[in-house]
Image (cartoon, rainbow, N blue to C red):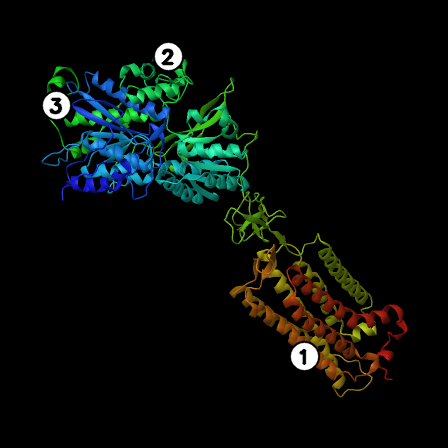
Amino acid sequence: MCDCIYVMLLFVLFMGAFGAEEVSAPCEMLGSPEYPLLSMEGDIIIGGAFSIHSQTSKPSLSFTDTPDHLICSRINFREFRFAQTMIFAIEEINNSTTLLPNISVGYKVFDSCGSTMPSMRAVMGLLNGQERTLGETCSSRSSVHAIIGASESSSTIVMLQISGIFQLPVISHFATCACLSNRKEYPSFFRTIPSDHYQSRALAKLVKHFGWTWVGAVRSDNDYGNDGMATFITAASQEGVCIEYSEAISRIDPSEQVARVVRGIQSGSARVLVVFLAQSEMEILLDEALKQNLTGLQWVGSESWITAGHLATTKYSRILTGSLGFTIKKTKITGLQEFLLQVNPNQDPQNNLLREFWEATFGCTFLSGRHDQVQCSGSERLQNITNPFTDVSELRISNNVYKAVYAVAHAIHNMLKCGQSGEEANKSCMWKGDFEPKQLVKHLQDVNFTLKSGETVYFDGNGDPTATYELVNWQRNQKGDIVFVAIGSYDASLPNGKQFHINGINITWAAKSPKKPQSVCSEGCLPGYRQAVIKGKPICCFSCIACAAGEISNSSNSAECSRCPLEYWSNEDHSQCVPKVIEFLSYGETMGALLTAFSLFGASLTLLVSCVFFWFRHTPLVKASNSELSFLLLFSLTLCFLCSLTFIGRPTGWSCMLRHTAFGITFALCMSCILAKTIAVVIAFKAKTPANTVPQCSAPLQRTSVLSCILLQVLVCLLWLTLAPPFPHKNTAHATERIILECDLGSPIGFWAVLGYIGSLAVLCLILAFLARKLPDNFNEAKFISFSMLIFCAVWVTFIPAYVSSPGKFTVAVEIFAILASSFGLLFCIFAPKCYILLLKPEKNTKKHMMGRN
């Protein structure tokens, strides 16, 4: 089947709505029943499709009667300016001696009416011409060589579905739907306005930049709005922005639907509204917003309406003042204003569009006999009128039209291999008949030229231009008029962190908001708190929960708390990590000072007892107590009291080794002396000697036994220090909020071997003293030794579970307490009775009394 058959099948679907007549053969009638609104013949014809009218009639589709014609009404001055800009650019090209010399460029402008059905009619007219012809063959040649348009994405898509069959290039100045960048589906499409793929992401970065994480959204219910909003929502979620609601409206919706949308906006908690609407839908929304007195919102708009001058009127200003949005950069087109001001119905008296434009501009009529309206003379001056047609202060989209026309001209210029300038260019650039549209598509892809304004025009692989935007803010000037002030920019070609930029210009915020409005679902969390998502609500709705112990959040609105490093802990506010308190038993604290005092007191008391014994060294009691072992025992007890001081203070490598070895050796010496005394007492009183003899034991034997016992403990300590010595250790496991500085045993076996050896000596002493419990009462030293050993063993048996279960510095305190308690027990039990006799009962310090029996 030929291409024309496919086109006609599509056309037949809509021909009833166009009021077309019935045809009898497949290819007998392919033309549109409508004529172009503006046209001029030439070697090359550029078609144009603009929404010159913004309203369309709704034909009755009863399926029984022939539908009425579609009627477009309500002229759109801005779109009419776009059409005139296209004509202006074509006239410039025709007057140029360097661009397409010897070739004339014509145009055909059709009205797409901003709707899909009229757009279908327009593209059929552009493809097939204005006449209904009966021919023998159906030519695939189009009546135009390229099409500029349309102004809406949906209309452009409809046109591409027809023109794409013939690979006819379409260059849009205002269709921004990201879907049109699909080269496989739309291989002949180009545009001079960036894709919404970039604008939507720019809008997401904009709302995030100002801290608006809770926004509402309204879109046009068409390809432009739906696709753009979908991209925005995706980009917003990546930026941490949540959408409270997303509504869609269409200009064909009943008023009740629009009213419902506005009520939803008013009842929402979001104070920022992202509006992805075409101008026609925007006007409908604003009219309903005025009815319901919708104010106090920060409007963020897309490029379709953010610089629309006819919206910046007194009627809408109280709603839209302070609006923000991205738009393409504005420029100046030299000579365009003068060209626009020359437009007059006298240029073509038969042209109904020019007459309609004139009537709408001046509020008059060309029809005679209408007494209710002023008659138009045609001599009215456009210089006295200010409307979107004559306003060239914001040439943004018009410049896109201008660029599109020049892109076609440059592509044809290159395709025809025209020279650069001079006579050679005029000779080489000759019109040689028609050409295939796909040739023009190829050369359009490769165009790269610079306009008189200095702007470079080229297309990427998807037919899109470089995505650069201006961020504009609706502000009032000194006269009270709304002006669009550029306050920032967005350039998608830059690295991610540098794409978005805000100038140092004061920003006007939404009406009734002198300060930047806040739009969040939940108030921000202070440092020290984290956000906890509320079940069933978006992530932007959260509650603030204090960070757990040892965790911090040092910034506002932290999603989670971070754990402090091992040696750090959170402060009271949980806003920063501070070094953990290092805990050890120090001399400066109360407990350390008391233990130090008791230790020194015990050592001093022991020295005092030594002095007493030394003073009475020649008395029978001291002699009977084996003075040599007594002095050695007092010396060892003094060391036992002093060794407890090594457990106090900051642990170091040397102090850790000293405290345990000093403790082990001094107590081994102490137990050895007591064991020797006990053995001496037992041997002396168990021997078969006269009753009046003073018990004596061989001194060398005593010294040998003491030395042997102490050397064995020294050997154990040396092995411990050699193989696995104690060392200072930062204990972070026992207490998470502090560091316990303690001495690690190195080898627990070594520690318990030292302690066990001392315990075995104590148990042996206890057994021997128990056996000597029935010795003479006046000299029963074994009874006191037995009692002291009971206290010693009780203290150290109690020490073991207390030592294991005590946390931190209390472990050391328990160990010191055990040392002091056992030392005081030995001192008082063994030496207190003797000091009592020596100092208070000297009459009992006689040999007779020592040898007496009860």
Which residue is label 3 attached to?
A: 431
Which residue is label 1 attached to?
A: 764
Disc 2, SS: loop
Q: Position of residue 296 (x, y in %)?
A: 55, 33
Closest to the observer: 796 or 530? 530
Which residue is drawn at the image coordinates 49% and 28% (left, top)? 316
Q: Which mark is residue 381?
A: 2
Determine which quarter of the picture holds residue 823.
Answer: bottom right
> Disc 3 marks which amino acid?
Trp
Single out the mark in the foreground, 1 or 2: 2
Q: Position of residue 829 (x, y in %)?
A: 78, 72
- The C terminus lies in quadrant: bottom right
Q: Mark 3, residues whose alpha carbon is within 10 Å: few (<14), some, or many (≥20)? A: some
> Disc 1 marks which amino acid?
Leu
User: Tag 2 or tag 1, which sits nearer the N-term?
Assistant: 2
Q: Mark 2, residues whose alpha carbon is within 10 Å: few (<14), some, or many (≥20)? A: few
> Disc 2 marks which amino acid?
Arg
Say if 816 sits above or below 476 in the image: below
Determine which quarter of the picture holds residue 726.
Answer: bottom right
Q: Position of residue 185 (x, y in %)?
A: 25, 42
User: Does the rendering let one see residue 161?
Assistant: yes
Single out the mark in the foreground, 2 or 3: 2
User: Does the rendering let one see residue 392?
Assistant: no
Closest to the observer: 573 or 430? 430
